[in-house]
Amino acid sequence: MQILVVGAGVVGLAVAYTAARAGHHVTVAEATGGVGNGVSSRNSEVVHAGIYYPTGSLRARHSTHGRRMLYEFCAAHGVTCNKCGKLIVATGDAELAKVEALLAQGRKNGVEGLEMIGGNAARALEAELSCIGALSSPESGIVDSHGYMLALWGGLQDRGGMIAFETPVERMAFKDAQWHVRFGGRDAGAAAFDAVVNSAGLGAQALARGIEGYPADRIPRLVLAKGNYFGFAGGPVFSRLIYPTPVDGGLGVHVTIDLAGRMRFGPDVEWVEHESYTVDPRRADSFYERIRTYWPGLPAGSLLPDYCGIRPKLTGPGEPAADFMIAGPAVHGLPRLVCLFGIESPGLTSSLSLAEEVVGYLA
Ligand SMILES: Cc1cc2nc3c(=O)[nH]c(=O)nc-3n(C[C@H](O)[C@H](O)[C@H](O)COP(=O)(O)OP(=O)(O)OC[C@H]3O[C@@H](n4cnc5c(N)ncnc54)[C@H](O)[C@@H]3O)c2cc1C
């Protein structure tokens, strides 16, 4: 089939790569001038083990399976990753109960190697840590997400696929057994495809509204939850990912390390109405407060505003977290069309597994 994938983020690229490997002719249309310019370059680059999500949910299934696929892909394609492990820490009795519940959830999800360790054992691993217990997750890690996206792009090109940059998809309609697609941008025009995948991230709902005959009541609302990061002006103190217990809308302000060993903190949760990518330095106060619950030694004046990302959520503050939404023909009634909505965390980890399911829908 001639397949159009809309969006060259990590999920669109994984879908394009997987479809090309399955023998399809694949074109990716990307509104900006490069790969990974959306949500995919504004995240923690963490390979999630698959602990937090309700068993049987798409997020649980695709993060555990996707994580294994991602590590294998990295090994086979020379993409840098580091299975550095992660500690989810409890700083009081109420948190200990939450962390123990996460252990049970993670085990139910089939996550390997999880174990509870005491405060002393945690400090033996990470001397600066203050906690009464922690859940140790040896399968968690970090990945060079840009290296990963470049490898997917290379794999797509090797199989004859291509990316059309500065090519926003505006409208499409299914006629005479084909999708007729209108593009704007540099080379505005039209083309026909057998199948289309909408993996436009924050633009997925807007694109669905441009699809003739797509039932409006099947387009979920888009809720924007900004996540701000602060960099640490100092040498690394931790060698593992350190997470507090999760908060409403996110996993809590955690310590991530990049592949060069530098530490940063975030993301927090800031519900916003519009996309904006500035980090308000005043948010540092709440970061100091939260980080010092598990790292009392955080020096004053050491946090510097860094970058931020926006989670494309389907539910808002106080509401239960929504699952990923993979809308195929059974949802919208249109043939050979899959729309991906609400692909927030752990979308990077899940990308290859999500891609497998999406390509399966197109067959
Ligand atoms: C703060 C934050 C932290 C996160 N941390 C992690 C983490 O540690 N681990 C993890 O696994 N996941 C994490 N995630 C989630 C992960 O980053 C996303 O799930 C993933 O990047 C989504 O990729 P995507 O391809 O769906 O979207 P995007 O990367 O946003 O790609 C969509 C692309 O579509 C393009 N586009 C939009 N509309 C159109 C159109 N009409 N025509 C053509 N192109 C269009 C956009 O320009 C964009 O390039 C995090 C997310 C956030 C926000």
Image (cartoon, grey):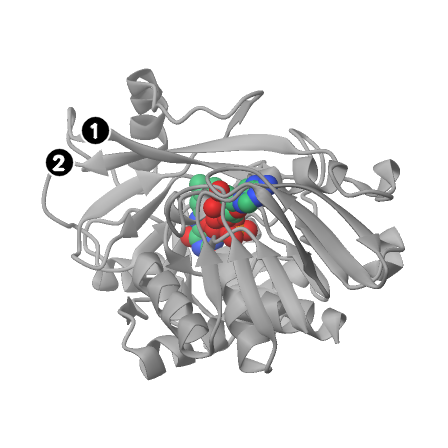
Location of residue 288 (image quadrant): top left
- Type of amino acid at the residue the image marks with label 2: Ala
Q: Is residue 50 above or below residue 131?
A: below
In the image, what residue occupies the spot 26% across and 42% down?
A: 264
Seen as rendered, the residue at the extreme left is 235
For ligand 1, tell me if the residue under mark 2 lies within 8 Å. Answer: no
In the rendered image, which residue does mark 1 sit on?
304
Location of residue 281 (image quadrant): top left
**Tag of residue 133:** none
Q: Residues within 10 Å of mark 2 (few under 14, many from 20)?
A: some
Label 2: which secondary element: loop
In the image, what residue occupies the spot 40% across and 66% down?
A: 153
Label 1: which secondary element: strand
Residue 24 visible in the current orientation: yes
Counting from the top left corner in percent of width and height, residue 117 is at 39, 65
Q: Is residue 139 above or below residue 305?
A: below
Q: Is residue 266 above or below residue 89?
A: above
Q: Does residue 28 appear left or right of residue 205 in this picture?
A: left
Foreground residue, 173 or 34?
Answer: 173
Q: Are marks 1 and 2 in contact (CB under 8 Å)?
A: yes
Q: CA distance from mark 1 to mark 2?
A: 7 Å
Q: Does residue 219 appear left or right of residue 140 in this picture?
A: right
- Type of amino acid at the residue the image marks with label 1: Leu
In the rendered image, which residue does mark 2 sit on?
233
